[in-house]
Image (tube, rainbow, N blue to C red):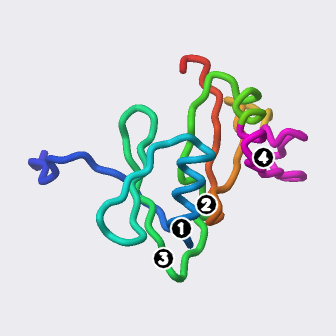
Amino acid sequence: MATSLFTDTAYSGFSVDDADRARAFYQDVLGLTVTDTGQPGVLFVDLPGGAQVLAYAKDDHQPATFTVLNFPVPDVEAAVAELGRRGVTFEHYAGTPLETDEQGIFRGGGPLIAWFTDPAGNVMSVLEDPER
């Protein structure tokens, strides 16, 4: 096995179309801590558990075609209700293998999950994990 060259914490990142709107969403709607990196349009979002993700403004941003963040919660229905009160709209996948109910919750096997997007269109989820 090779010796690792990496000695610091690793983090993931994704693009957004507007760093100020991203900051407002992650901080004011989701309640996460957002910090500047010192570079214009580049933010660190502190995730529960101590991890961070980098959100960076990109002029030709295209939303990710996959879920970029999953937030485990003890009760998906309660999380969907609270996020809805905060203005979050949940995705509905009618007529697909991931068909969701009227609340936007997938109940087709596995953990309950509901998907939503950030202002840049990146997909995120709340995922039921009763251990949380």
Q: Earlier in the sequence, mark 2 or mark 4?
A: 4
Q: Residue type at mark 3: give it.
A: Lys
Q: Can you identify the residue that label 3 sits on?
A: 58
Q: Main secondary structure of the magenta part?
A: loop
Give the mark count.
Answer: 4
Q: Earlier in the sequence, mark 4 or mark 3?
A: 3
Spot occupied by residue 131 in the image (x, y as percentages of width and height): 55, 17
Q: Can you identify the residue that label 4 sits on?
A: 98
Q: Say whether residue 7 is left or right of residue 76.
A: left
Q: Earlier in the sequence, mark 1 or mark 3?
A: 1
Q: Residue type at mark 1: give it.
A: Val
- Disc nearest the viewer among 2 and 4: 2
- Disc nearest the viewer among 1 and 4: 1
* Residue closest to the eye, 7 or 44: 44
Q: Are marks 1 and 3 in contact (CB under 8 Å)?
A: yes
Tell me the SS state at disc 1.
strand
Tell me the SS state at disc 3.
loop
- Disc nearest the viewer among 1 and 2: 1
Q: Can you identify the residue that label 2 sits on?
A: 122
* Residue closest to the eye, 25 or 77: 25
Q: Is residue 44 above or below residue 64?
A: above
Q: Are marks 2 and 4 in contact (CB under 8 Å)?
A: no
* Residue closest to the eye, 79 or 85: 85
User: What span is in magenta?
Assistant: 83-105
Q: Can you identify the residue that label 1 sits on?
A: 16
Q: Earlier in the sequence, mark 2 or mark 3?
A: 3
Spot occupied by residue 35 in the image (x, y as percentages of width and height): 38, 53
Any magenta on residue 90? yes
Q: Which of the labelled discs sits on residue 43, or is there none?
A: none
Q: Earlier in the sequence, mark 1 or mark 4?
A: 1
Q: Residue type at mark 2: give it.
A: Asn
Q: Is residue 124 above or below residue 42?
A: above
